[in-house]
Amino acid sequence: MAISTELHARFCERLRAVRSEQGLTQAQLASMLGIKQPSLAQLESGEFVPSLDTVDRVCRALKIDPSSLLSANSPAA
């Protein structure tokens, strides 16, 4: 599935930005989430639409508030 909404696109863009700002590779974040790197790549590229549980797990791993990945008015980190 490709990115279908502005919210999904914003999530993908900000996820990549925050991960990078925190100096994490996809493999490192994937390990923190208990998933494989290709799955994280699909999440970041928009091929996979995350559930609310997934958004929560990502935010906990990155130690950020979900609004920083979802809100139109929030900076990436």
Image (tube, grey):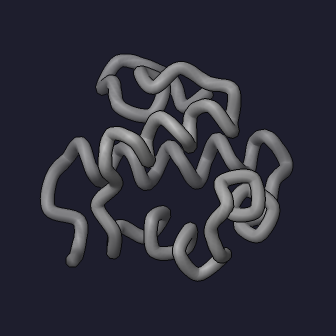
Is 3 placed above or below 75 here? Answer: below
- At 31% across and 49% down in the image, what residue appears? 51
Decide which of 55, 47 is in the foreground and name it.
55
The image quadrant where one finds the N terminus is bottom left
User: In the image, what residue occupies the spot 48% across and 63% down?
Assistant: 44
Tell me the quarter of the picture where residue 29 sits. Answer: bottom right
- Count of number-bearing discs: 0
On the picture, is 59 further left or further right than 62?
Answer: left
Task: Report the residue at 20% width, 47% height from top.
Answer: 6
Residue 31 is situated, as x and y percent measured from the top left of the image, at 76, 62
Picture coordinates of residue 37, whole percent (x, y): 66, 75
75 vs 50: above or below: above
Residue 65 or residue 31, whichever sits in front: 31
Residue 68, position in %: x, y?
48, 25
> Can you name the residue that lies furthest to the left here?
4
Q: Is residue 76 left or right of residue 5?
A: right
Figure check: 30 above or below 60? below
Q: Residue at x 33, y 69 (%)?
A: 48
Where's residue 66, x and y in %?
45, 26
Image-quadrant location for residue 62: top right
Q: Residue furthest bottom?
A: 38
Q: Quadrant of the C terminus?
A: top right
